[in-house]
Amino acid sequence: MSDRANPSGLKALFDVLVAGVSPLTSGTLKAMILNASSSVVADWDAADTLDDITTPAEYVEASYSRLTVTCTVAIDADEMVLDFTDLLWASLAAGANSPEFIVLYVEKTGAAADPAFTDRVPILLLDAVFTPDGTNYTYVIPSQGIYRIPTA
């Protein structure tokens, strides 16, 4: 499976970046790790929130937590480029399941506390199969940005 964008999530991201465009005028960009047992691939395109994924199957381990992510938007020639900070989970230990995906999402302001999936709008699904071993795990975002949208 290759990395995929979610149309509803991209709209939510732009709504957050440009305050006042829609009812979703504030929120936080975040990242979470999903296990191999997740149904995220089958449910991705129709998911308006992470709660719409039948089996989200988030990674569970005491040292793991969801990350807050910074996004920048730039125009490069005739493309809009979305770029995110690299994702770093410190001292990520082995859990009961194997990580397979990273989901970037917008958490709406006022959303229920983690580990809830409601009020979380998926943006990007990233392939990330790895084996946690107690060391830092960094998902490096490509230097040319993670998502490019033609503007012309």
Image (tube, rainbow, N blue to C red):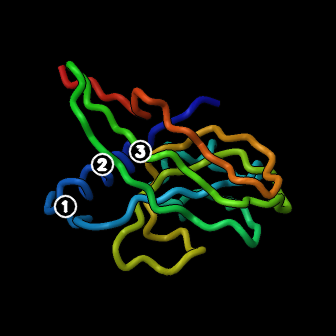
Q: Which residue is drawn at 37% across and 79% down?
A: 110
Q: In the rendered view of the protein, which quadrant contains the N terminus?
A: top right
Cα distance between the residues tagged 3 and 2: 16 Å
Position of 131 with respect to 19 (left or right) is right
Check disc 2 and give the amino acid type.
Answer: Lys
Kindly report the distance in space between the C-alpha atoms of the residues bearing marks 1 and 3. Answer: 23 Å
Q: How much space separates mark 2 and mark 1, taking CA atoms?
A: 10 Å
Mark 3 or mark 2: name the one nearer the start of the chain: 2
For label 2, the crowd category at 10 Å Cα-Cα, with few meaning under 14, some 14 to 19 and many 20 or more, is some
Residue at (81%, 46%) from the top-left corner? Answer: 131
Q: What element carries label 2?
A: helix
**Residue bearing mark 3:** 84
Q: Callout 1: 10 Å neighbours few (<14), some, many (20+)?
A: few
- The local secondary structure at tag 3 comes to strand
In the rendered structure, which amino acid carries the disc numbered 3?
Answer: Phe
Using residue 7 as the reference point, say whether residue 15 is left or right of it: left
Residue drawn at x 58%, y 58% is 32
Q: Position of residue 147 (x, y in %)?
A: 40, 33
**Residue 15: x, y in percent?**
24, 55
Most foreground residue, 133 or 45: 133
Please say if 20 is above or below 137: below
Residue for point 31% across, 32% down: 81
- Amino acid type, label 1: Ser
Q: Earlier in the sequence, mark 2 or mark 1?
A: 2
The residue carrying mark 2 is 11
Instruction: From the top left corner, tell me how far across and down residue 99 is, in percent.
Output: 74, 50
Query: Quarter of the image containing the C terminus?
Result: top left
Per the image, the residue denoted by label 1 is 22
Q: Is mark 1 on a helix, strand or loop?
A: loop
